Image (tube, helix red, strand yellow):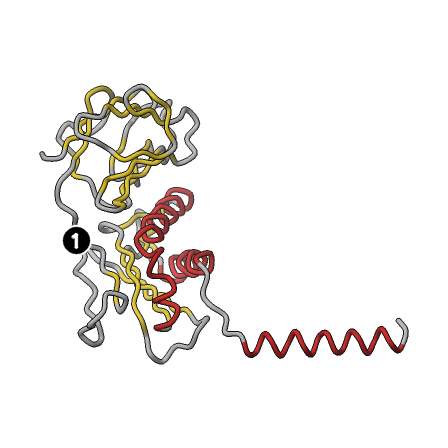
Amino acid sequence: MSLLERIEHRLSSWIEGAFRRRIPRRVEPLEVGRALLSAVDRHKRVSMACVYAPNKFTIILSQGDLEDMSSLARTLEGELKGVLQEKAEKDQLRFIGPLSVAFAADPELTSGQLQVRAEFCEGQCEELPSQEEPNVDTQVFRRQQILGGCLIVEVGRGASSPIPLKDGMAIGRSSQCDLVLDEPNVSRIHARISKRDGEWVIEDSNSTNGLFVNGTRVTAVPLKPGDQIQVGTAVLTYKESI
């Protein structure tokens, strides 16, 4: 390398480093997912019969990163629950209660910093209390119970009673799913249901045999009362009330 090339290389490295120091790094969703999986491995507990994993997670960010993540919070919560369910199935972990994922801010954290608090919570987890009563919705995102809407298994080996919908609901053959369909042609996690803009939306989770609503194969579609949902050979009906 010539003297001129070495000088150019040093200058470019210095300039790049200066810009990196001046431009604050923000937390990306991928980092959140990795931190969540790492927290599961750190906090899991081994019993005589199985391995338990924490089921209540609080993702703590700086105020700026929390506000930046606010537009993705609801969607990201559903995706993260799905990632946790897949890890539990892969590693044969057991949750002691429903999964809960929430976001919170810590004024002591700077942009780009991330912490995950993992806890064990039997039954329905309580809402996350804020450190200070927030005046804006971006201070803490809580997983709220959404009333209305249920699925009824018309054909297939599944629950005999109506299943109330919830944000991030997983449907499939895995025992970790919210609605388990014991059918050989149903994928482990076949589909998910989430709440978007006031509507329940069902979405195919890259299943082998696809997702059909009223006879049409779909990737993602809002549900309407009376919709017939086909998951493998199982047939479900969506109703707005139980």
Give x and y (percent) for residue 45: 33, 57
Q: Helix, strand, or loop for circle 1?
A: loop
Tell me: residue 164, above or below residue 48.
above
Residue at the farthest right position: 2
- When asked about the image quadrant of residue 59, the answer is bottom left
> Quick check: 200 above or below 238?
below
Picture coordinates of residue 95 (x, y %)? 28, 50
Name the residue at 81% across, 78% down: 7
Q: Quadrant of residue 117?
A: bottom left
The answer to which of 240 and 93 lies nearer the viewer is: 240
Who is closer to the viewer here, 216 or 103? Answer: 216
In the picture, which quadrant includes the C terminus? top left
At label 1, which amino acid type do we have? Gln
Say which quarter of the image contains residue 159: top left
Circle 1 sits on which residue? 124
Q: Position of residue 2 (x, y in %)?
A: 90, 74
Relative placement, left or right, of 241 versus 16 is left
Between 185 and 76, the one nearer to me in the picture? 76
Q: On the picture, is 206 further left or further right than 172?
A: right
Q: Quadrant of the N terminus?
A: bottom right
Look at 38% across and 57% down and name the residue there. Answer: 40
